[in-house]
Amino acid sequence: MGSTWGNKFKVAIFGESHGEGIGAVIDGLPAGIDIDPERIQQELNRRAARGNPLATPRKEGDRIEILSGVFNGKTTGAPLAGLIRNENTRSGDYAKTKDLMRPGHADYASSIRYHGFQDYRGGGHFSGRLTAPLVFAGAVAKAVLRAIAPEIAIGSRIIAIGTKEDQKIKNWKEYEALTKGFINPEFPLYTPELEATMKQEIIAAMEEADSVGGVVEGFVTGLQPGVGNPFFESIESRLAGLLFSIPAVKGVTFGAGFEIASRHGSEVNDPLAINGSKIETLSNNNGGINGGISNGMPVVFQVAFKPTPSIGKEQQTIDLKKMAAATLSIQGRHDPCIVVRAFPVVEAVTAICLADFLI
Amino acid sequence: MGSTWGNKFKVAIFGESHGEGIGAVIDGLPAGIDIDPERIQQELNRRAARGNPLATPRKEGDRIEILSGVFNGKTTGAPLAGLIRNENTRSGDYAKTKDLMRPGHADYASSIRYHGFQDYRGGGHFSGRLTAPLVFAGAVAKAVLRAIAPEIAIGSRIIAIGTKEDQKIKNWKEYEALTKGFINPEFPLYTPELEATMKQEIIAAMEEADSVGGVVEGFVTGLQPGVGNPFFESIESRLAGLLFSIPAVKGVTFGAGFEIASRHGSEVNDPLAINGSKIETLSNNNGGINGGISNGMPVVFQVAFKPTPSIGKEQQTIDLKKMAAATLSIQGRHDPCIVVRAFPVVEAVTAICLADFLI
Amino acid sequence: MGSTWGNKFKVAIFGESHGEGIGAVIDGLPAGIDIDPERIQQELNRRAARGNPLATPRKEGDRIEILSGVFNGKTTGAPLAGLIRNENTRSGDYAKTKDLMRPGHADYASSIRYHGFQDYRGGGHFSGRLTAPLVFAGAVAKAVLRAIAPEIAIGSRIIAIGTKEDQKIKNWKEYEALTKGFINPEFPLYTPELEATMKQEIIAAMEEADSVGGVVEGFVTGLQPGVGNPFFESIESRLAGLLFSIPAVKGVTFGAGFEIASRHGSEVNDPLAINGSKIETLSNNNGGINGGISNGMPVVFQVAFKPTPSIGKEQQTIDLKKMAAATLSIQGRHDPCIVVRAFPVVEAVTAICLADFLI
Amino acid sequence: MGSTWGNKFKVAIFGESHGEGIGAVIDGLPAGIDIDPERIQQELNRRAARGNPLATPRKEGDRIEILSGVFNGKTTGAPLAGLIRNENTRSGDYAKTKDLMRPGHADYASSIRYHGFQDYRGGGHFSGRLTAPLVFAGAVAKAVLRAIAPEIAIGSRIIAIGTKEDQKIKNWKEYEALTKGFINPEFPLYTPELEATMKQEIIAAMEEADSVGGVVEGFVTGLQPGVGNPFFESIESRLAGLLFSIPAVKGVTFGAGFEIASRHGSEVNDPLAINGSKIETLSNNNGGINGGISNGMPVVFQVAFKPTPSIGKEQQTIDLKKMAAATLSIQGRHDPCIVVRAFPVVEAVTAICLADFLI
């Protein structure tokens, strides 16, 4: 249990890193939504590792086949299923180290949870590869949003790689510009000058057979006020639930995030104002959400990714079968920094969340 | 929609700040669990404002009446319903300012969401008062956990009030000691010497008719490894979903939180080790969770609370009816710092989350 | 688990026959729906035993108190909770026979399910008394339907008491007349002349300290075509699920019911026709539903109620504590035929089902 | 929405009659369950039309490919996905008649529901072909039950074809014998002598280019007492919900069914008795369920199937595009009586239901 989500836009994801394939079934789609397979493929390509020197050398084709739910280029209202066949798997990499629990990975926790029956090859169902079905579902969600709420735009940017941080955006109106696109959409920065510095941070980690973490900021503009609910079905609750579903995420904040906790109400209460016929807030410390409900301002949130736990550096661990201490240098093909592939996933789950609220 | 949660431990909360009463219905309880009404009342008393000079002067009796689901002192397996009658409501405080949208509150977002039909008195269903039903449900969840997983202990501490911060706990074994109790359980600090400083931060805000935020750390010891799921039903996803349900929460992190994003894998991957017959990790940067599943270490997480948005200081806002700019000085009785009452709520939703996983 | 239902109109019922009270919490209501407490009370009165000689002599006041979710006579969008205090309980009736499993009742099955912790007094949570919260929720659902789909009318009629049957209605247009009301709304018959015969069937059973079953037909007119879903969320699946939730129901059929199974396709396929600007079917053997979705014809369904299992006649049973054969003559106050009080419950769950589809 | 079901054994089915393929994703499986692909294939073969003269001449290979969730022959605990490619589709049969609404079919209702975007070829997602994914999920559920409750046996028999009925089984102990197998498992009858008569009923309908309905009885032996819940999650509610998900089902009854409604309590209350160390009931009019919970007796239920609506005989209908009366003789390949292929589907959804209760 754990791979099914949604009230109205229901997603069930499946697959393992080295099994037959991965995919998703989406139930609850309105009929008549345009589905352009090429546009969906492009979203998957954004996530896939395609010879990017900063990403795993595994060649992931990630060709999506739509199995159902689309007829004459439009959704039928029946479940939409998509399948990505796994290719280029080198499962042999894993068999020899299957009893060595990789630190920071789900190996030990899942061995207990599934009594040793989990597919250990490449992390199995816990692999970051399962973010491809999330991106697929997100691409379908974006198609829904284009049809039912075309004013919504979803974007994301890298705000930190390791210790290198981009600046905060104080004026919320700037998010509207950012949704138009970044100078380098494959490395989206508010301050493009930081690109070399940040990439160097990744390369430095890679050269030490190590990895590095980072932070992504997601944002949504054009979301009408009045969407969401109090308590368990708040935008924050539901979006955070999805964001923490992304492997390696360890923190989620909205608006001014943890900084808000250090401040006075008079500093961070966002004063309301009338601008022409629109109601706005002067600041956006609440990240576009009050009481779990959108207030018309950009929804802004930050997502902390830990460094990829797979590293070549020797680590201390245990051999679960022998119940003995062991050391481990993880071979195989790994991302030195997951952040450079994770921001499309952040956008995807944001789209899923909004589609579920708005259908 | 938004006030119902759970797969196995199902909670439905209801009520408004100034209506007849507030409460919760809990479905899915195992039969035969000891329910001690006095123990439940004590949990509610921890949350209630009882003449604490740092809290609202509203006298909240918060007497819980159990309406169903308990027979001869034990759960029957049928839904357990609890009701708290509202007392000491001074609704007149609100009628005169109902069109003035309080900055930082749900007033504007909920006016749009519910087309003006929401109960505006004291924030209605959005009131922090609705955390009382959460604490009630949490107290029932704790009774369940005592019966089915008595080794689990849930605790919390204040780690920041405004800019005053307590230190991080690097050695995870210390959390076991903390679950035994704090020197001042009403102001739980790892470094008790900070109490005066932190309280002074609150008093300073109060004296300026302002408010201040803070951070709570929650922790769980004794949780066996192998609890949880990948993706949407991970411990992180589900617990974060509940924590963001608490009014005023704007951030949730696990383990080392955002700091993990600035580090290398070799620094924050928690190495596994064998300690006698037990498997442990040397550090606990992952906060006791890998791949969404518990690994046997303490589950540790941080929760950022914004300053109470209700402040006496004059604020800029709008009159929604007149669609005109306005100013507002919120009168009435308010907490200058929600944190001092929120940590029992953090514990309560943690208990709810664990009961749902473990039943 | 079992007392919570709904996707959009979420109901949680609670209470036991002889506990403090019974009630329901409804989440997911649109804001701004008129709630007239007297009208809700009238629905409850239809179900209550009020000195009706054919019903239990237990005097059930069934006064509903609305605790939340209504402000200035309208729904707020927050959960609406209602409470009925139990009165006039004579729990002593039950203590002495608690180990004697009443045949046809849930006593034995629930003793195993809840390990003996269930509230055995009057059937506890399994009591027919729990249909009062269903009727309450149904009355709220009807208020929703009046606002969002005023063309819908829900009705019901008795089609059998024991062996005495009223006739089938072949012309579906007659259902529209029936929703206008019956000659005796407390004993709704298509053929009013049968009233004395049917009542005699009940009296005869009562005089033998026995009980008798019967059949209710529910119907909905004015439901637009295109409501519902295939498979698990079909109208039939969801409505049947609710109808089987009513204690004593053992069968549910739609349209021509079991008779359809004995016929040829050419006899029971409902031919489509155009009547002015409307599309109709000539017959309605499918009961207004094709593929789980409404087709615009009246939704018609039949519900079989078994005889009340509580009878004064001596019955063979077991003493569960002694694990020995025993005999039992059930004393106390019981309905000789549940059907005369059940038809408002059938209507109530129908309203709940439709509100969930249409909100 | 409508193609996703389950609390613990979660099924999402997908596909259309003439699309790329059909299948299901099952989430919530325990790890370590033996999965024998050949055994699953055999269940599918029972449902498939394989040259049976009483079934459609469409040759359905129905080869299942398991895409995920199985490793080394056992479930991993991750979602198990299965795919059946469609073959031998003759979509041309449908294009020319797409505006002619087939009486008794979902054509009209789904045209309204999905605004004309549904895949009309062969009924699309509404096709009886979608029972193959149900049978696949049922085969997985049976594998789960073999592992966790091996004493459970699920069976079914044909109790009526058109007007030809087999007898009722009064002695519930006979169901145990029936679960051992039928003389002709492809046409399971309690009274095998009726086979020719019943088949003749089908052939007669076929020769008139017509179809005929029938009734299936499902039964479960070995189910321990104490499984199920009151109200919305009763065995009856949940099983009926699944049974009504099977296309063409119009009625579901438990135990003595509608007959119980005509009787006295003293006749149909099932007296309890002690047989050695076991508790039994003398009769089983309640079909093994009291208060929604199993009582240890066989669970017995009847399912009414309407005649296949696709018939060659000329029928009156409408052309939805022209909004004009029309006649229609359905060509193509159709089953004259769905019952001969439906009983494995009844068993499959019963297994799904029980797995969901028992996992």
Image (cartoon, coloured by chain):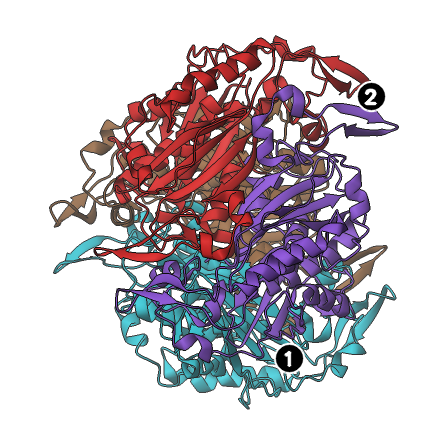
Chain colours: A red, B purple, C cyan, D brown
Residue B316's quadrant in the figure? bottom left
Residue identified by numbered label 2: A323
Up-down relation of residue C69 to residue A2 (above or below): below
Q: Is residue B319 above or below residue D295?
A: below
Asked whether the residues under marks 1 and 2 belong to the same chain, the reply is no
On the image, the x and y values in percent for residue A294 come to: 38, 51
Chain of the residue that carries numbered disc 2 in the rendered image: A
Can residue A255 be seen in the rendering of this structure? Answer: yes
| Image location of residue C67, percent across then percent down | 52, 75
Number of marks in the image? 2
Disc 1 from disc 2: Cα separation: 69 Å
Residue found at x 42% / y 14%: A61
Q: Is residue A164 left or right of residue A61?
A: right
Residue type of the residue flagged with mark 1:
Asp
Name the residue nearer the viewer: D134 or A199: A199
Q: Nearer the viewer, mark 1 or mark 2?
A: 2
Tag of residue A25: none
Residue C79 in view, yes or no: no
Res B291 → quadrant: top right
Please name whichever residue, A176 or A22, is drawn nearer the observer in this view of the structure: A176
* Label 1 crowd (10 A; few <14 / some 14-19 / many >=20): many
Residues B176 and A245: in front is B176
User: In this figure, which residue is indicated by the disc labeled 1?
Assistant: C210
Q: Residue at x 43, y 10 (%)?
A: A51
- For the N terminus of chain B, the image quarter is bottom left
The amino acid on which the numbered mark 2 sits, given as a three-letter code, is Met
